[in-house]
Image (spheres, rainbow, N blue to C red):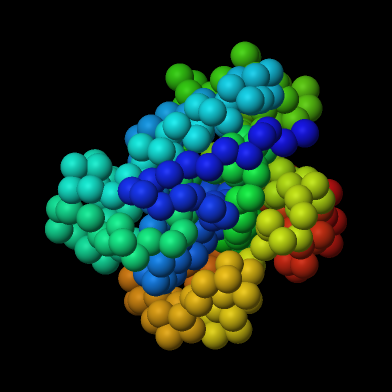
């Protein structure tokens, strides 16, 4: 049961239908976030410290959110009350990645408060707080990004920040099991975790995320959740933009989205669709498909091996 609706006011603007961009690590949420941040009327944030502290607490210890549902919603709403404020001081605390999305590197607000109609956030690993987000903002709209897990693993293997969660000091399987954040669901996986390869651990994280995405899709009304494939986003941005505009009720420019995709290709050629074929070794690809083959097949990504199990 959702909590009682609460209207948050930021810079004299009521927060209605806030948008949250969700997905597994390296699924392409940053590209979608950049398009929204550069759309008229949107104020989108990424990685504000208050939000990260709360969402990672929920992600790593789900009981914090489920045991005190209404309290968790209030804490998250308070975090966004601070994160979404628009002022030189508040925006000066934005992390570098947030400013990179806006294309405005100088200190100071990257958006004018007077023109803001909608608020959004695309902080990492929001997916694990989806239920709390809907309790905090019952009219929220969720944007889910799905990407081939093998390409995701290829990116994760080169990201020290992602890999840091696998270190003994961060992995919390002794305290939290099953562990949605690490994707460890049974005793066999738990027992093998310490000796598992990094590719296997990345595959478990992707598998856990897409399983969570599937459950979210099943329990969320269609008007509050839109799923976008990364592959469509980068190969057919002109077709994705109208779908985003219709869902959000605010124009998302085809030209802007197409330009962002081209810039992404120039800056990060290794994020091309199917780049896992040159980035993963044969052994790593087999490991990913062994761990997450059923999910890859269910989502329509052809396997390079015959057995999806």
* Residue 285 can be seen, yes or no: no
As rendered, which of 135 and 101 lies closer to the eye?
135
Image height check: is 39 above or below 106?
below
* Residue 298 x, y percent position in the rendering: 81, 60
Residue at the extreme top of the image, as rendered: 175
* Residue 78 can be seen, yes or no: yes
The residue sitting at 50% across, 27% down in the picture is 75
* Residue 188 x, y percent position in the rendering: 77, 26
The residue sitting at 43% across, 44% down in the picture is 9
Location of residue 193 (image quadrant): top right
Image height check: is 218 above or below 93?
below
Residue 218 as seen in the image, left or right of residue 9: right
Residue 156 as seen in the image, left or right of residue 210: left
The residue sitting at 38% across, 46% down in the picture is 10
As rendered, which of 113 and 133 lies closer to the eye?
113
Residue at the extreme front of the image, as rendered: 12
Residue 299 as seen in the image, left or right of residue 138: right
Image height check: is 57 above or below 112?
above
* Residue 150 x, y percent position in the rendering: 62, 58
* Residue 35 x, y percent position in the rendering: 44, 69
The residue sitting at 72% across, 53% down in the picture is 289
As rendered, which of 282 and 263 lies closer to the eye?
263
Which quarter of the rendered picture does the N terminus lie within? Answer: top right
Give the number of callouts. Answer: 0
């Amino acid at each position: 049961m959702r909590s009682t609706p609460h209207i948050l006011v930021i810079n004299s603007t009521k927060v209605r239908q806030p948008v949250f961009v969700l997905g597994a690590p390296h699924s392409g949420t940053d590209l979608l976030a950049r398009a929204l941040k550069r759309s008229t009327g949107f104020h989108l944030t990424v990685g504000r410290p208050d939000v990260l502290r709360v969402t990672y607490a929920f992600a790593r210890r789900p009981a914090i959110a489920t045991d005190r549902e209404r309290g968790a919603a209030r804490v998250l709403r308070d975090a966004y009350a601070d994160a979404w404020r628009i002022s030189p001081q508040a925006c000066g605390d934005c992390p570098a990645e947030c400013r990179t999305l806006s294309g405005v590197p100088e200190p100071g607000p990257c958006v004018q408060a007077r023109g803001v109609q909608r608020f959004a956030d695309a902080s990492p690993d929001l997916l694990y707080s989806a239920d709390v987000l809907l309790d905090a903002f019952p009219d929220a709209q969720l944007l889910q990004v799905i990407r081939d897990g093998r390409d995701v693993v290829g990116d994760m293997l080169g990201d020290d920040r992602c890999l840091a969660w696998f270190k003994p000091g961060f992995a919390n399987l002794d305290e939290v099991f099953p562990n949605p954040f690490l994707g460890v669901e049974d005793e066999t996986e738990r027992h093998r975790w310490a000796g598992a390869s990094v590719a296997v651990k990345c595959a478990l994280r992707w598998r856990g995320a897409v399983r969570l995405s599937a459950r979210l899709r099943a329990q969320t009304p269609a008007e509050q959740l839109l799923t976008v494939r990364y592959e469509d986003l980068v190969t057919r941005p002109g077709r994705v933009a109208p779908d985003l505009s219709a869902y959000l009720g605010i124009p998302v420019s085809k030209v802007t989205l197409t330009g962002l995709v081209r810039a992404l290709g120039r800056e990060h050629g290794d994020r091309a669709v199917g780049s896992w074929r040159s980035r993963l070794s044969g052994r790593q690809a087999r490991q990913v498909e062994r761990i997450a083959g059923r999910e890859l097949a269910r989502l329509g990504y052809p396997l390079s091996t015959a057995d999806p199990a």
